[in-house]
């Protein structure tokens, strides 16, 4: 029987419409092969929404997202909207969507593809085979804790304050995502904190350790964040799944991403409570410098669609098939400008879509 999945598409700005068009073609091709049916609803976000409605996240967009099984987002932002007041900026739309859908878990894979190993700034023998998933808490910790602000002390000096706070329920729900993600991968989970200095981190470590009792098939380890960053650049292959708080995850996921050296290849997922749709998007921005020129690399968007199939739509075979097709076109030497190297075949965004479709039908 044909399975139905409702997907909200948010092309956004810049290269967004170009790369999401490729992902949709790929999804339609995979639907035919796997007896799936996708119903796509396109909605406005970011600068495109500001131009059409005056606000970066129209209510209809949030409603469309809430009524779907998953959301595929491209990217938002651009020079045109950079000087608007904060509440009207494209980024405010993104933050509003994360809050509106309760997206508390951010999953960012960093996988080294053998064909692109020279794009990394680290030695090939250090990064060959790296396949890491960083699970970052997204709606708590120091970015949201109270009190926050810049205050004037009794002596008249200004003092800036942010508060790192996590409740047990916040720790438990992100740790659960960490353990379950590790189970879907190689079964190794590293929890990163700063428990030697921070009380909030000690609570984090105690809870994660206690939860390990429920996940006996996951091998749990703990690292302090400073050591974790060192290990990530020294010997990244020791990591499989990393779970950590908002601030540490922000830094670690960018460091892990840079092991791969190619921003146009990196997908991500943001997940909320059960019943809420996950949002899948490339890690990169809207690349206004190359927008509309058929130069964008659509592979991070296509790999985001594969993550959507795996994590929200429970279609792991279809996800793997897309990932295999991406590998195949890279094996065949096709490259967009951002990942080009001598001897390879330079192609544009649309042609990358065509060779992907050919690879899927092989
Ligand atoms: P960016 O990721 O858009 O671009 C950085 C560089 O990488 C540029 O040279 C760009 O051409 C290149 N690049 C990025 N993606 C590419 C792709 N798929 N193929 C080929 N080249 C690619 O980051 P930026 O320049 O700092 O930001 C541009 C805009 O994007 C800003 O308005 C920023 O706020 C926004 N932004 C949005 C998101 C998001 O939507 N989640 C994330 C980051 C930045």
Image (spheres, rainbow, N blue to C red):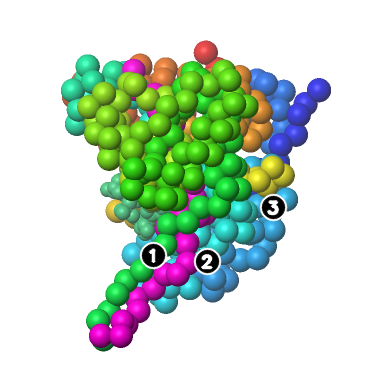
Q: Point out residue 237 in the picture as x, y percentages from the top left corner.
A: 32, 21
- N-terminal label among 3 and 1: 3
Q: Is residue 278 left or right of residue 241?
A: right
Question: 308 or 99: nearer the eye?
Answer: 99
Which residue was labeled with disc 1? 162
Q: Do labels 1 and 2 touch, CB within 8 Å?
A: no
Instruction: Indicate yes or no whether the magenta region holds residue 230.
Output: no
Nearest the eye: 36 or 314: 314
Q: CA distance from mark 1 to mark 2?
A: 27 Å
At horizontal 54% and vertical 74% (from top left) the residue drawn is: 54
- Residue 136 in the magenta stretch? The answer is yes
Q: Quadrant of the N terminus?
A: top right
The segment highlighted magenta reads 129-155
Taking the image as drawn, is residue 117 in sight?
no
Which mark is in front, 1 or 2?
1
- Dot placed on the residue nearer the N-terminal end, 2 or 3: 2
Asked which secondary structure carries label 1, the reply is strand
96 with respect to 6 (left or right): left
The numbered disc on residue 56 is 2
Q: Label 1 crowding class (10 Å Cα cut-off): few <14, some 14-19, many 20+?
A: some
Q: Any mark on residue 66, and which?
A: 3
- Asked if residue 93 is positioned above or below residue 29 in the image, the reply reads below
Kind of element beneath mark 2 = loop
Give the residue drawn at x 69%, y 42%: 274
Q: Please provide percent x and percent y for residue 91.
A: 45, 62
Give the mark toward the camera: 3 or 1: 1
Q: Is residue 92 left or right of residue 228?
A: right
């Amino acid at each position: 029987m044909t399975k139905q999945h409702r997907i909200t598409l948010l092309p956004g700005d810049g290269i967004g419409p170009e790369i999401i068009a490729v992902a949709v073609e790929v999804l339609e091709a995979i639907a035919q092969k796997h007896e799936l049916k996708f119903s796509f609803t396109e909605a406005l976000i970011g600068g495109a929404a500001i131009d059409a409605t005056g606000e970066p996240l129209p209510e209809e967009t949030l409603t469309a997202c809430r009524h779907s099984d998953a959301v595929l987002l491209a990217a938002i932002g651009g020079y045109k909207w950079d000087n608007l007041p904060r509440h009207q900026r494209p980024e405010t739309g993104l933050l509003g969507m994360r809050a509106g859908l309760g997206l508390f878990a951010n999953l960012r894979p960093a996988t080294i593809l053998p064909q692109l190993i020279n794009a990394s700034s680290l030695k090939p023998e250090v990064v060959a085979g790296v396949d890491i998933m960083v699970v970052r808490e997204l709606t708590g910790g120091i970015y949201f804790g109270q009190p926050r602000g810049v205050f004037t002390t009794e002596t008249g000096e200004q003092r800036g304050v942010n508060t790192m706070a996590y409740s047990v329920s916040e720790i438990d729900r992100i740790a659960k995502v960490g353990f379950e993600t590790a189970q879907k991968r190689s079964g190794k989970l590293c929890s990163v904190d700063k428990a030697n200095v921070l009380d909030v981190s000690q609570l984090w470590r105690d809870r994660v350790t206690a939860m390990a009792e429920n996940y006996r098939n996951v091998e749990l380890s703990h690292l302090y964040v400073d050591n974790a960053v060192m290990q990530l650049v020294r010997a990244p292959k020791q990591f499989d799944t990393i779970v950590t708080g908002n601030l540490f995850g922000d830094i670690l996921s960018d460091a892990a991403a840079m092991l791969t050296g190619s921003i146009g290849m990196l997908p991500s997922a943001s997940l909320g409570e059960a019943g809420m749709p996950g949002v899948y998007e490339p890690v990169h921005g809207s690349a206004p410098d190359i927008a509309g020129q058929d130069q964008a690399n659509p592979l991070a968007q296509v790999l985001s669609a594969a993550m959507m199939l795996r994590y929200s739509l429970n279609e792991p075979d279809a996800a793997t098939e897309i990932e295999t097709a991406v590998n195949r076109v890279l094996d065949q030497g096709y490259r967009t400008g951002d990942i080009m190297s001598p001897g390879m075949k330079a192609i544009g965004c649309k042609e990358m879509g065509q060779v992907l479709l050919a690879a899927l039908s092989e």
